[in-house]
Image: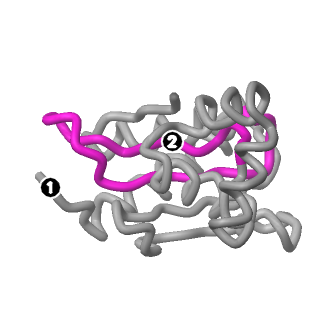
Amino acid sequence: MSDLTLAAAQTIVTEALAHARANNFNPLGLVVLDARGSLKASAAEDGTSLMRWKVAFGKAYGAVAWGAGSKKIEKIAADRPQFMSAVAHLADGGILPVGGGVLIRDAQNRILGAVGVSGDTSDNDELAASVGIRAAGLIADGG
């Protein structure tokens, strides 16, 4: 498999949100992007704030743009804040360097896209994304 299908993206959304509900996470916003950074699927649960979708997008977009999960990007930002600020500027502010952006990989380790989740702790956001990705038969790479 070399492309992220709509069916896989929808499975990711459904299963990530099911995991969040089963574990009483705060309401989540979730975005699935393909390897080009194009939107494949998204959802915002009842009770999310206006910015949740944008935050989720920034996490996923950063992961696709860097080819790394957002935990790794968060470390880069902490270690080299001026560099991260310049990169974020080049991306028109579209990269959010905080946990919850998870790369989607296939069995050959190719990047198919990324999932961004926002609404709970960064660890729970990442966990929900990872559960959804694995439910679609793909590999989650949070960095």
Q: Range of the magenta residues?
A: 97-122
Q: Looking at the rendering, which quadrant does residue 83 occupy?
A: top right
Relative to 129, 113 lies left or right? left
Question: Looking at this view, is 24 or 39 the one in front?
Answer: 39
- State how many labels appear: 2
Q: What's the distance in space between the residues labelled 1 and 2, CA to CA?
A: 17 Å
Where residue 119 appears, x then y in whole percent?
Answer: 79, 50
Residue drawn 75% across the image and 25% down it = 79
The residue singled out by tag 1 in the image is 2
Amino acid on which disc 1 is placed: Ser
Residue 66 drawn at (x, y percent): 49, 47
Residue 43 drawn above or below residue 72? below
- Amino acid on which disc 2 is placed: Val
Q: Nearer the viewer, residue 10 or 77?
A: 77
If you read the primary sequence from the N terminus, does the residue marked by circle 1 or circle 2 appear first?
1
Q: Percent position (x, y) of residue 33?
A: 45, 64
* Residue found at x 48% / y 38%: 68
**What kind of element bears circle 2?**
strand
- Indicate yes or no whether the magenta region holds residue 110: yes
Its colouring scheme is one colour
- Quadrant position of residue 92: bottom right
10 Å neighbourhood of mark 2: few (<14), some, or many (≥20)? many
Q: Secondary structure at mark 1?
A: loop
Nearer the observer, 28 or 31: 31
Q: Are marks 1 and 2 in contact (CB under 8 Å)?
A: no
Residue designated by label 2:
102
Mark identifier at residue 62: none
Residue 87 lies, in percent from the top left, at: 66, 55
Magenta stretch: residue 19 in it?
A: no
Mark 1: few, some, or many residues within 10 Å (few <14, many ≥20)? few
Q: Identify the residue at image location x=20%, y=61%.
A: 3
